[in-house]
Image (tube, grey):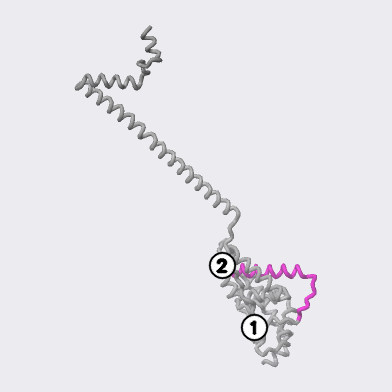
Amino acid sequence: MQTTRLTRDEVKSLYVFRRSMIQTVGTCIGHQRRAVLDVVHHLFLKMLGKKTFVLQSPLAYFYRATRNASLNLRRDRQHETDLQVSQSWFVHPSGNLDEVLNLQQALRDLPEEQRETVFLKVWSGLTLLEISEITQTPLNTVASRYRYALEKLRERLGKRLQTKG
Amino acid sequence: MAFYDEDTERYLHEFRPQTIRELELAPRQRKVSLRQLTAAAAVVVCAGGIFWVTCRELKHSNEAANVQTPKVSLTSQRRHRTTVALTKLALSDNEGFETLLTEESRKSLPNFQEEQSALKILAKD
């Protein structure tokens, strides 16, 4: 398997360019957004402090690292009650918080795999092929998850979508 | 590729994720390990020891050279001068040569001209 050694600057630039991916993965896996982001931030600072060897593509490596950090945090805090339900993950141009919270609730109701696919496709700007590579999932499965997720979101957000249309 | 609900996609794209903060990079500090410090100290001690030993040996050899060289040269010169001078004197001035021998023998041998001399007493006997 090909091994890539990343320099400090490469880690930093990946963090900057893939911030949205890191954020969305952290957000969709661990619902305590701030705590997840702190963990991910700490993870990257640790990576910057030492020589990082990547066995796959750098993007896939960072996705796995972020995902694992988020999952660890969720496991550690599963006994805690999430009191930050109203914390917003997104910003809407209109500044309407209700709209944001409604979308968040609809995303929360999705199965985790579907939610993750939507986050990576819509807010991280990855293609379905890239998502299948970094999540090590067949392309058809990724496409199906995305399609089902959009259908469910449309059902949940139906009235709002109609008013927009 | 499958057809996706474009309206829903467009609606979702209206939202922007909250931005996350920049990485706060601390200035890089070079850590010096205990092993490196020990190695450096060992090198310094070894180098100092070698320097000290070398200086000491050089000093000793210089002193030895300063002491031995004149000794050898003085002795050889004196011997050479004496031999040449005595040969010349013996060839040219026999009486002078005898006088010189007498003076030299008086310097190196005990004086039996004195009253308490053991040789004088023996000579009388």
Residue A75 lies, with reference to residue A119, above or below; the image says above
Q: Residues within 10 Å of mark 2 (few under 14, many from 20)?
A: some
The residue lying at 73 percent from left, 84 percent from top is A101
Q: Mark 1: which amino acid?
A: Arg
Secondary element at tag 2: helix
In the depicted view, which residue is nearer to us: B89 or A12?
B89
Percent position (x, y) of residue B40? 54, 52
Q: Mark 2: which amino acid?
A: Arg
Percent position (x, y) of residue B21? 63, 76
Say whether residue A135 is magenta: no
Residue extent of the magenta highlight: A58-85
**Is residue A53 among the parts visible in the rendering?**
no
Farthest-out residue, left: B92
Which numbered marker is on residue B16?
1
Residue topped by disc 2: A8
Residue B111 lies, with reference to residue A109, above or below; the image says above
In the depicted view, which residue is nearer to us: B57 or B96?
B96
